[in-house]
Image: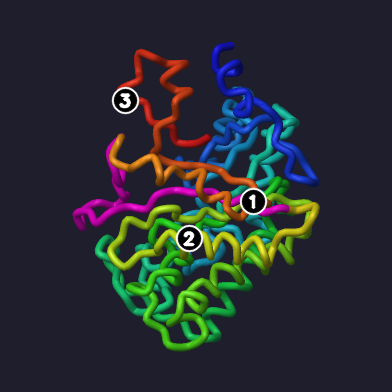
Amino acid sequence: MIGEQRYPHLFSPLDLGFTTLKNRAIMGSMHTGLEEAENGFTRMAAYFVERARGGVGMIITGGISPNEEGGSGAKLATAQEARQHRLVTEAVHEAAPDVKICMQILHAGPLAFAQHAVAPSAVKSRISPAMPTALDEEGIEKQLSDFANCARLAREAGYDGVEIIGSAGYLLSTFLVAKTNQRTDQWGGSYENRMRFPVEVVRRIRAAVGEDFIVIFRIAAMDMLQGGMSWDEVVQLGRSIEKRVRTSSAPTLPGTNRRYRPFPPACRAPPSPVSRGVLPKSWAFPRLPATESICLKLQNRYWLPVMRTLFPWRARCWRTQSL
């Protein structure tokens, strides 16, 4: 196959220490709407089984909230909810035992589209109808505990790992950015304080799930927001996460994606932030492995040469959702 010859690393195994991905093709998280549909988990199981049979190395599910505050969609906070998820994991592992499946933990924060939305500060998003409630110390502790509980239940449900989304205007990213984090306590102010919450989320999740479980942190490699994270801050966050959660047998796998630029208030989903060819080559995402000892997953709208090789007739329009 041409792709295997030209891009041997893409089709080679990836050693994560305690486990191995059969290749480096990852199905990125996409919300299908099945999570909240009638008989949704049975239908979702069939959906992911087809993707697993297609040869992907790892699947990441659509976003699942760790609590009621995290959004009005599907959540994982109880043992009963974990039993529903087991329909998905058992079906995937039976169909393709060598495929890993991870659950994305998504706390929408100020984008929860609900009256009980929470955030580090009472800063309203332009695309949400509700003003979020600023978290107090008790509220922050509850969110941290709920993240850890969600990850623990994901493991009990049979998932091979979890992805924590720390980008895209959701709860964790609002702690990181000064525009949405106006706190003056230990959770705000300096960048070291602003990144304390997401780093603590990852630390508690690793403690809850143990070392033999995949943990992915989805970081915004490019904020593309005025007053957003600088490149140095992106690297600092990656290194802080690595320092606190990595062990010799359980590395954390960070994912990167680009966040949106400002867009019309009527939009519910962020559009593609930049057009092909806008970014200089010096901004290529492989700069992120400056941390050296962790694996890197690239995700969302970027151009992949292998797609132009395998599908030359779509060279002008193909954008890959995941790698």
Q: Is residue 185 left or right of residue 90?
A: left
How far across and how far down the image is residue 191, in percent?
A: 46, 75
Q: Nearer the viewer, mark 3 or mark 2?
A: 2
Q: Which residue is the site of mark 3?
A: 317
Q: Identify which amino acid the numbered label 3 is placed on.
A: Cys
How far across and how far down the image is residue 239, in percent?
A: 60, 62
How far across and how far down the image is residue 265, in percent?
A: 21, 58
Q: What residue do we see at 41% from left, 84% from top? A: 183
Residue 269 colored in magenta in the image: yes
Q: Nearer the viewer, mark 3 or mark 1?
A: 1
| For residue 189, above or below residue 306 | below
Residue 28 in sight in this render: yes
| For residue 187, above or below residue 38 | below
Q: CA distance from mark 3 to mark 2?
A: 29 Å
Sequence-wise, which precedes: disc 3 or disc 1? 1
Q: Secondary structure at mark 1?
A: loop
In which image quadrant can residue 42 be found? top right
Q: Which residue is the site of mark 1?
A: 292
The magenta-colored residue range is 251-276
Q: Identify which amino acid the numbered label 1 is placed on.
A: Glu
